[in-house]
Image (tube, grey):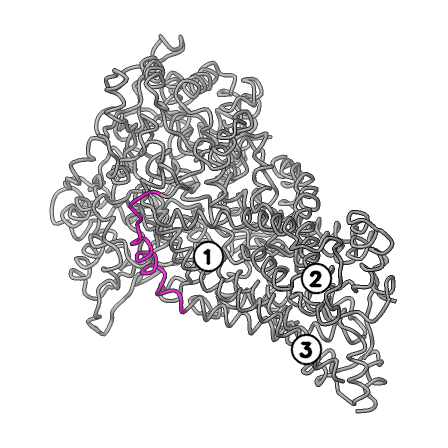
Amino acid sequence: MSVDSEVEPRPRSTPDLGGAGRAATRPAAPRSRRPGNQFGIKAVLSLIAFVGLFPFLFMLMASLKSNQQYYESWWLPSAPFHFENYARAWAQIQPYFVTSVIVAAGSIIGALALCTVAAFVFARYEFVGRKVLFGLIVALLMVPGISSLIPMFVLMRDLDLLNTRAVLVIPHIVGGAVLGTLLMKTFVEQLPQELFDAARVDGASGPRMFVSIMVPLSLPIVGTIALVTVIGVWNDFFWPLLTVTENELRTVSAGLQFFQTQNATEYGPLFAGYAIASIPLLLLFVFLSKHFLAGVQGGLSNGAGK
Amino acid sequence: MLRFSMIESTRRGLSRPRSSTALRLAAGATAVAVGLAACGGGGADPSADKTLTITLEGPNQWNESGSSFGKPWEDLIAAFQKAEPTIKVKTVVLPLSSFSQTISTHLASGTAPELVFQQVPHQPHMVHPLDEHLAKPNPYIKSGPGSEKWIDVFRQRYYVQGNPKIRNAEGKVELVPFNLVGIGLFYNKEAFAKAGLTAPFKTFEDLLQGCAKLKAAGYTPLAMDRSDIGPEWTIRAISGMLLDKHVDRLNTYTFDGKPGKATSATGAPAVADKAMAKAVLSGELTTKTPEVAATLELLKKMWDACVDRNWSGNTEGLNGAVVGLRDFATAKAAMAWGVNFGVSALQDAKFDVASMPFPQITAESTPLASGAAPRFGASIGGTSYMIPSTVKGEKLAATLKFLQFISTPEHIDPWLKATGGISAVEGATGAEETNAFAEGTWGDSVPLEFPAGPTSVTKLSLVEGWLLGTKSLEEQQRYLQDLWVKGARQIVKDRKWNDEPWAKA
Amino acid sequence: MTDAGTRSRRRFPWYAYLALLPLFATLAVFAYYPAASGIWHSFYEWRPGFDSPFVGLDNYATMLADDLWWDSFRNLGVIFVFGITVSWAIPLLAAELIITLKSRRAQFFFRTVLIAPMAFPGVVTVLLWAAMYEPGDGVINRVLRSVGLDALAQNWVGDPQFALLSLLLIGFPFVAGLPFLVFLTTLQNVPAEVFEAAALDGCGRLRRLVSIDLPLMMSQVKLLVFLATINVLQYGFAAHLLTGGGPDNATQVPVLRMLAVAFQANDWGYAATLSTTLFVLTIILSVVIAFVRREDRANVRRL
């Protein structure tokens, strides 16, 4: 009947991005023959993590250099350290932070509002046209970004939305909603049927199940979508530059572009700027990581209680 | 995993304008440090009843601010607003990395403001032809050139009169220059002294031998990166000399597109675009033409002798002012192509910088040498602006006033001096340290050079395989011939020359 | 609400459609309309701010004869194979290692650290890798030279032989991405008893990977393959920033060609033709893949 019919020793545990859910259902099973502290595994993982983070260590290194130092050796630290690069970078991007935060928040809220409901309906209801409608959403993934760029720009022009914050938010809502619907539908389909059955026996309606079962259980995926959306906002500089010519309405990513000048790219301040711009993302990242866990555990105990 | 929008940026700092030589923006020597302090333009608005705002949109050529081109620019605007209290000029600053796509999209969609930077891909229907206005007096010039016809104030050698190639595909003038740009070879004086060389090199052979000596002294002779402009400028210099003997033969159309000889107002013959398209499509100029093959061979010779083996992997610090800036600025390389304003990018260098023209190609290098002098040093194109065709009525009149104001010698001179610019108008002296770029035969335009490929193909890709040694001469000739024909076909289509007998497929 | 079950079995539950309405209304205006407009204008000499002459199939005829366009597809095969093998191998390894860890704290720590690079903007990643690839000063060549492997030091992005591979390796070890999260989530959802039983049967680690873990992941992997296919046809971000299709066209891809036609040649109608073609090709490929993953039927569970 479904994918999990191949292996069904007992009801599936709740999908979990955080890793804590499993612990709740599977108390520390002895899987490794050799106890110890699994030093080898940790070493390999550390190596992978180091290689992954390695470029960003150099970003920090380069952010403290003058161009001359950067040209001489961009990766070895060299004195004097130009901490003033951070002051310059902050002065450059500080005016744009407000817009970036508003755009990111608006995009997340918009995308989540649209995709959670849609994913719930797609995953838990059967109705005529379900496959076709879902296919229509999947098809949007196949449209090359550039083919919609100019029509989208012309549309915004005709709707008189150029030079507003709405014009910055809308594409991210659309992108987030499409990706979000896909991810969340897959996720919700794998939620244990027992939860919904139990709720139905208790007389819960569709909306009620949506609010009390799906939303809490899908917090990890909500976190993922939020993160992906924020990263999208933080990455995108071409659309903001294209649609917004009022300096006050520009985003951080657009503002950072100005360090590449006619004569030379100002690497120190540029990397310092990216480092500063990464801080909110990292904070969010750490925060959401914890949230994954809390959300899953909370959702589980609620679900198990019924 | 995540979808990213593909158009996020152009290659760093590089743009590929439609027709003119790559990016030769002008940047300020003194204005670099003038940053955020000067935001906000004119400040308080004198709340006059009928204040008209015109907006100018262009890349930031002078500093890293997102809101101002710097103090000298604000002063220029303030002077204009004082002269015309009912007009307010607003500046929209775009970053260098993506201004080209931004402006060309604005132009194409009809949302461009009153003035846009000229070096962006565009088509004639998107901008106002200025010919009619240029034939009328410039109201800010009371006497002398320009007082009867605006066009007279510009330096003839560089503007349309002397260089008709800056007309657009419909034969119209569409741009007004704020300054000129000069191109040359920068060199490191210490490196030259160490290698026992005296600049400038007189002949191409001197250059090759000089490269050998510089190599022996531990330098990369010529800095190079993977931008379009290094190979492009070298080809223009070499082919401009070698192809000189074909100018007369291929000069078959006037600049108006009528059969006849094209000559610039300075009297020099030149091959117009239409004659060029004909030469390519009729096979009068092919990659098998001996001088074309010789150009390719000398280019390769120069690359092998002067350029670092790994030049094509140098993606660092691409910019519009100095080719291979990092290697030159760190004294790793001894020479570099650059524009006059590149001086400011080199101000932190720990050695003395000077500049020279490209050397002459003599019979020593190839029996096909023509004896023509090296040319193409200076041109319009540093900071030039156009008026989109969607601008009409009062706004158009106000915009024209602004352009007339900035082409008035006494009004533009302070800005030129402050930004290290070369004057585009007669009677303004500009900045002393850069004027030499526009002097002598080196300052002339090239009458005939390699034809262009299709606009959708980078100039670098036309010769990259040949320079890297992945294509033999014969393969390169076949490859380039194909792209020349494609480029000529595109021009024929764009300019509707399909009915010419030579344009038939 | 006792009839909730029967109601949901209706073929046309109005509330389901109503709930989908906001999403589809938004998509209609801001996704379907622009996409359709792009397709529509591929039949025009498109001048968005001005009048656009209808040219019928001219743009498509141009495309058929455009060898630069068709040549740009040459590299896609390599990109696809790389995308579903090399760039999944390390994420899979990392996911396996993490679930093998006994300490939850360690699991959480490594998972967080491994996906942390997601928080850095893609542009910076490319910029930094470009610096690492520098033939003279770049870290990669310096390291190779310092351990005596001078022969392996290359002109990474500047040599037509290595340029494409170098671009593909940007972002190595590829752990900070969707595939890793998918692998990890799937493995964590495998009931402990399965692994325990496998261990009791003396099933080795590798054996378990092949005979248990991978089959369990199949349905998720199919989704990843589907996304990878789409990504391959739209590949071009790093090439756009770093090589522009060079050296000597070694990294040319359809998207770059499309960008060049749009932004360098300013030929929006033709660019629309190219993107429409790419869209159609993507759909065809997706349908093919859908046939391959035939057994993955709709798995709706009724409420």
- Which chain letter goes with mark 1? A
Task: Give the residue type that dot 2 points to.
Answer: Thr
Q: Where does the image place residue B348, in percent across and percent down from the top left? A: 25, 39
Sequence-earlier tag: 1 or 3: 1
Give the position of the N terminus of chain A as an image quadrant.
bottom right
Q: Secondary structure at mark 3?
A: helix
- Tag 1 residue: A237
A41 relative to B42 in the view: left or right? right
The residue that appears at 67% across and 38% down in the rendered structure is: C78
Of circles 1 and 3, the one toward us is 3
Tell me if residue A89 is in the magenta stretch: yes
- Distance of label 2 from label 3 (alpha carbons): 17 Å
- Image x and y of residue A241, in percent: 43, 58
Taking the image as shown, residue C102 lies to the left or right of residue C5, namely: left
Q: Quadrant of the C terminus of chain A?
A: bottom right
**Which residues fall within the magenta stretch?**
A78-98
Left or right: C62 as drawn, with respect to C302:
left
Would you place residue A113 above or below residue A55 in this image?
below
Disc 1 secondary structure class: loop
For label 3, the residue is A299
Q: Residue furthest bottom?
A: C1
Q: Please give left or right for residue C156 compared with residue B132 in the image.
A: right
Question: Mostly what secondary structure, the magenta segment?
Answer: helix
